[in-house]
Image (cartoon, helix red, strand yellow):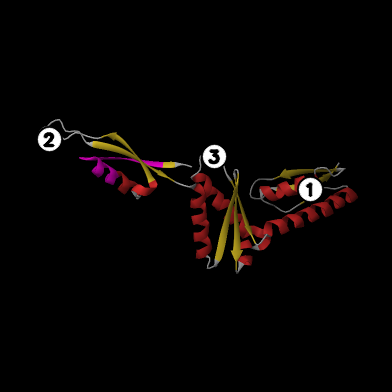
Amino acid sequence: MKQLTATGTGQTVDEALESALKELNATKENTEVSIIDEGKKGFLGVFGSRPAIVKVTLKIDPVNEALTFLTDVIQKMGIDATIDVNRDGRDITFNIAGEQIAILIGKRGQTLNSLQYLTQLVLNKHSQEYLTVIIDAENYRLRRKETLVTLATRLADKAKRTKTKVVLEPMPSFERKIIHTALFEVEGIATQSEGVEPNRHVVIVAK
């Protein structure tokens, strides 16, 4: 969890705190306050005076930031949906449910993949450790995985039968991994990824 900090100064600790909170646009309830210097009024309130200094830290939850971003995007698309968040170690899954889910998924999951990519950027912008995002909608990811495994098996048979390379369409890295895993132990078949993102694709080769 990243932290945003601000240092406030003022004639009193309260004034210094108010200054720092204003800079962070935050309230005292969601911050941690450290008093660096309580300050000193000085003689006649002028000579030898020293301002009070406080350090205010605002904690940001990266998952909440990502959820807020994703919710905002979906609302701007005019879609009424609910989002359930699950965390397993460094893997964060956002499960979307509601109407018009097909619009969110897009052709072959392209819209869903774009949302996943952008949400992961937002998440890791606010996280001190690298986190992986998975965005699913009505179990699309499971259905897509089953489709890719079936496709991989069929194209591997074609590669062995024709003794030629079979080039698949460009896919995001997590979908290419499904292909590689499905064919890893298939005798007489090897797979490799070629090309440059976003056009990187899997090639199935008969050994």
Cα separation, mark 2 vs mark 1, equals 77 Å
Task: Choose between 152 and 169: the one closer to the eye.
Answer: 152
Q: Position of residue 120 (x, y in %)?
A: 56, 49
- Amino acid type at image mark 3: Glu
| Residue 23 placement (x, y as % from top left) | 32, 46
Q: Quadrant of residue 47?
A: top left
N-term mark: 2 or 1: 2
Magenta span? 4-19
* Front residue of this view, candidates 115 and 22: 22
| Residue 32 at x, y percent in the picture | 37, 42
Q: Secondary structure at mark 1?
A: helix
Front residue of 62 and 37: 37
Tell me if label 3 and label 1 are in contact, CB under 8 Å: no
Say if 145 sits above or below 44 in the image. below
The residue that label 2 is drawn on is 46
24 magenta-colored: no
Query: Mark number for residue 129?
Result: 3
**Element marked by disc 2:** loop
Which residue bears the numbered disc 1?
A: 182
- Horizontal placement of 112 versus 39: left or right? right
Q: Earlier in the sequence, mark 2 or mark 3?
A: 2
Q: Which callout, 3 or 1, points at the residue further toward the start of the chain?
A: 3
> Which of 93/105 is in front?
93
- Secondary structure, mark 3, is loop
As drawn, which residue projects farthest toward the top?
A: 48
Front label number (2 vs 1): 2
